Amino acid sequence: MISDILDEIAPATSGKSHRDLISFVKDRPGHDRRYAIDSTKAQQKLGWKKEIDFETGLKETIEWYKNNWEWWKKIKN
């Protein structure tokens, strides 16, 4: 999903998909292949509810990092 969003908002200069940068490694035995969060308890006990869907939030996060590279570059260095 991240690769697809990057292809849309920040296409690679090579013209290739960001998916081409993914390299798969052999999974370590005993580790989950999928992680999921059940927010039922937070909804029931705290009255919490999501305001935006996952894909929208992911896209907004990627756009923020794209538009604020000067901020995060300092931290990275």
Image (tube, rainbow, N blue to C red):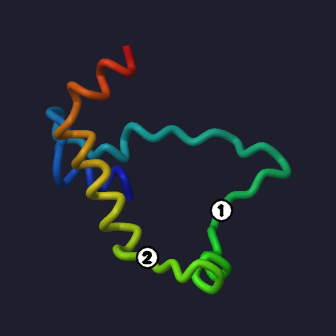
Q: Which quadrant of the view contains residue 28?
A: top right
Q: Which quadrant of the view contains residue 33?
A: bottom right
Can you give x and y, in whole percent of width and height, for residue 44 in the image? 63, 86
Q: In which quadrant is the C terminus drawn?
A: top left
Residue bearing mark 2 = 50
Q: How many marks?
A: 2
With respect to residue 18, does 38 lie above or below? below
Query: Dot 1: what SS?
Result: loop
Can you give x and y, in whole percent of width and height, for residue 46 in the image? 59, 78
Name the residue type under label 1: Arg
Name the residue type under label 2: Lys
Query: Dot 2: what SS?
Result: loop
Label 1: few (<14), some (14–19) or many (≥20) C-alpha neighbours in 10 Å: few
Q: Which mark is residue 57?
A: none
Q: Earlier in the sequence, mark 1 or mark 2?
A: 1
Q: Residue furthest bottom?
A: 44
Residue bearing mark 1 = 34
Disc 1 versus disc 2: nearer the observer: 2
